Amino acid sequence: LAQAWLKTDAMREPKSRLGWRCQRRSKRITAQLPEPAIVLAGAVGGPLCMFLLTPLRNALTLASQSPERSAWEVYRGVFAEGFGTGWTGGSVTILPSCPQFIVMGPLFHFLEEMFGTAVPAVILTAIAETLVTYGPQTLNAQLAFNAEQQLLAKPPVPLLRPMRPYGPGALAVVVRN
């Protein structure tokens, strides 16, 4: 069917000189969907990885606020109230990790084919990934920070809405992505 479409499209004569120019410049862009096994891996494995790595993210958050602390001291702070407290805020990163692990790869390849080069595809995919993940990752960091603040009897920081895709450090997240 695709070959028949290409043949009939190529046989059509443009109605003007502009039509010839447009026909020469245009190209057919196809979107290839990932195989079901890859979708399943992204839908299950991606959120699982994001959740299992929550203590590491929480440790990085706490270490960024107290660089003089050793790794042992930071992890003692992460698990201060028991083993389960290491996963404080991990649940907010699960839902956005599905499109992060399933959609971003095909989006990059689609944009690369559309633009004909990788540079704009990388930039736009990084922006899309930031729009999806910035809010939940920021909320995760705030929840981990507030958990430690509560132990120290200090006031917590106000929490960001998880659906807000921008804020302090968003540009750094785009560059990282």
Image (spheres, grey):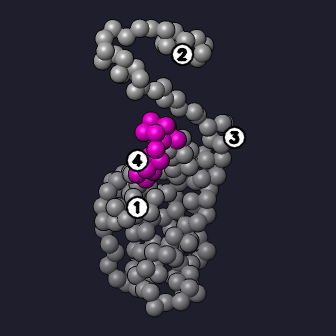
Q: Mark 4 points at which residue?
A: 120
Q: In the displayed structure, does residue 168 sit left or right of residue 25? A: left
Q: Nearer the viewer, mark 1 or mark 2?
A: 2
Q: Label 4 to label 2, Cα distance in Å?
A: 28 Å
Q: Which of marks 4 and 1 is in front?
A: 4
Residue type of the residue flagged with mark 4: Pro
Q: Nearer the viewer, mark 1 or mark 3?
A: 1
Q: Nearer the viewer, mark 4 or mark 3?
A: 4
Secondary structure beneath dot 3 equals helix
Secondary structure beneath dot 1 equals helix
Q: Label 1 to label 3, Cα distance in Å?
A: 30 Å
Which residues lie in the magenta part?
109-126
Q: Position of residue 70 (x, y in %)?
A: 53, 89
Q: Where is residue 134 in the image (x, y as percent from the top left)?
A: 40, 58
Count of numbered labels shown in the rendering: 4
- Does the magenta run of residues contain 35? no
Q: Name the residue under label 2.
A: 6
